[in-house]
Image: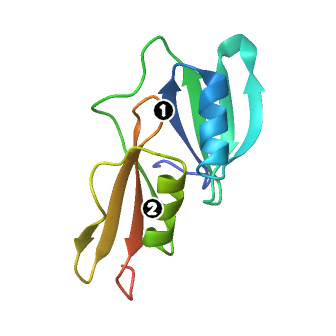
Amino acid sequence: MGITYDGGLTCSCGVTDMDRAIAWYRDVLGFELLYRMEDIAWCELKTGVERVNIGLGVRETAGGAGGATLTFGVTDIEAAKAELDRHGVRQDGPIRDIPGMVRLLTFFDPDDNALMFYQDLMETHG
């Protein structure tokens, strides 16, 4: 029988301050707030990837090592890095190059959740 997916994906991140997190994801990454539910300390934002949302849930402690790293494809990683720099976003070193394949940049939200940008250098996918 198997699993039938509907094409949507919501990625969840824990945050300690909902207002600060919403502002950061909106102002730094350009995500759009879809809704906020105060009674369950949860919100969802629309990312730049079709049918991929990020859900933010308030936790007493958030971020740090472990868990999944959300990795967003960008067309120009140098420009994306410059935007992060403009906002003073902490990054885990410079852009890493894997010649002929991909360029990668790891950075962190205000709660120390690791995120990444990638720029695909391969001409074909698959």
x and y, in percent, of residue 34 in the image: 76, 40
Q: Give the residue type at disc 1.
A: Pro
Residue occupying the far bottom of the picture: 123
> Tell me, what colour scheme is on the image?
rainbow
Compared with 124, 92 (above or below) is above
Q: Which mark is residue 81?
A: 2
Residue 88 vs residue 43, the one in the foreground = 88
Residue at x 58%, y 30% (from the top left corner):
56
Residue 80 falls left or right of residue 63: right
Residue at x 39%, y 75% (from the top left corner):
120
Rounded to the nearest angstrom, the CA distance separating label 2 from label 1 is 16 Å
Quarter of the figure with the C terminus: bottom left
Residue 38 vs residue 104, the one in the foreground = 104
Compared with 103, 67 (above or below) is above
Q: Give the residue type at disc 2.
A: Lys
Q: Earlier in the sequence, mark 2 or mark 1?
A: 2
Q: Secondary structure at mark 1?
A: loop
x and y, in percent, of residue 66 in the image: 28, 32
Reading the image, the residue beneath label 1 is: 110
Q: Secondary structure at mark 2?
A: helix
x and y, in percent, of residue 109 in the image: 47, 38
Residue at x 74%, y 40% (from the top left corner):
33
Q: How many other residues sit within 10 Å of disc 2, few (<14), some (14-19) or many (≥20)?
A: some
Residue 59 falls left or right of residue 54: left
x and y, in percent, of residue 85 in the image: 47, 55
Among the 4 quarters of the image, the one containing residue 122: bottom left
